[in-house]
Amino acid sequence: MKDLKNKVAVVTGGNSGIGLGVARALAAEGVHLMLSGLHGDKSERAATALADEYGIRAIGVASDASKREEVEALADLAFKEFGHVDIVVANAGVGLRGAMHKISDNDWDWLMSVNVRGTYLACSAFIRRFIEQGSPAHILITGSEQSVGMTPYGSMPIYAASKHALLGLADAIRNDYAGNGIAVTLLCPGPVATDIWDIERDRPAQYGQRAASNEESKKLIMELGMDANLVGRMAVEGVKADDFYVFTHEYIRDLVEGRYREMIAALDKTDAFSK
């Protein structure tokens, strides 16, 4: 999808962080936007700012990415307002640190409801509409470096599990819907300077007590984190090139190569059984 001018994109979790960085990069290409997030006023402010800066049409709405009825309503509204949608950015996500023996069922259920179910719902809702629309479309999924390997920045087992799941989901969608003209990009960023360190503020009551803001995570993210606008530009260049993977940090090469070497060594042992 080389020419993005006058395309329409829906960005979940689009009012801050990586989602807003991607939205800004899309707006710079002349893409009209619908930004969604839990807080509608925040989405509206972000949309207004991008519309004023780039001369595009942008709408901000409240939508819970983990709820089917709200995602379907988001899709219906986008097609009603713009007449068509060409790109969906399944970006809404939360993060949580903590060793396996210290996390709770509530932690698991909350994170998976947003990161995995939310991405599944966005892809499900828009793929059906993309097929009906019959024109080329693109899905951008925000994965993580932890989609391909483990990092040394603290224990995040359920986050890693969720981002591994998104690799499988993205790969399956790419395989299943290429014939429908639907391309897929998996964005795999390393640390990005966002407010995900304070994401507990949005934990619904049904998933237990909210933890205090994680100052250790805040310090780490702000020291090591890449600018979200740069991540957004890298992601959009990947969309334009129809790339499946977009990696943001050079050290991710070590994660990929380490995983590859380990798997090849295991396959060498498999070969020994056939001799």
Image: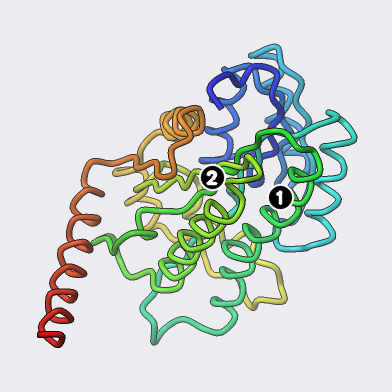
Tell me, yes or no, whether the two marked residues, 2 and 1, touch with CB atoms within 8 Å. no
Q: Quadrant of the C terminus?
A: bottom left
Neighbour tally class for label 1: few under 14, some 14-19, many 20 plus, Cα within 10 Å: many
Residue nearest the observer in this picture, 164 or 249 = 164
Q: Identify which residue is drawn at 40% across, 52% down.
A: 218
Q: In this picture, is 201 found above or below 49? A: below
Q: Which residue is mark 2?
A: 184
Q: In this picture, is 155 found above or below 191? A: below
Neighbour tally class for label 2: few under 14, some 14-19, many 20 plus, Cα within 10 Å: many
Quadrant in the picture for residue 243: top left
> Which residue is most to the right?
80
Quadrant in the picture for residue 176: bottom right
Residue 269 position in % (x across, y down): 13, 81
Mark 2: which secondary structure? Answer: strand
> Which residue is most to the front?
275
Q: Identify which residue is drawn at 18% across, 74% down.
A: 267
Residue nearest the observer in this picture, 272 or 75 = 272
- Marked residue nearer the N-terminal end (2 or 1): 1
Q: Which residue is mark 1?
A: 127
Q: Amino acid at mark 2?
A: Val
Residue 31 position in % (x across, y down): 66, 22
Q: Amino acid at mark 1?
A: Ile
Quadrant in the picture for residue 98: bottom left
Q: Identify which residue is drawn at 22% across, 48% down.
A: 253
Q: Quadrant of the N terminus?
A: top right
Q: Identify which residue is drawn at 17% across, 68% down.
A: 264
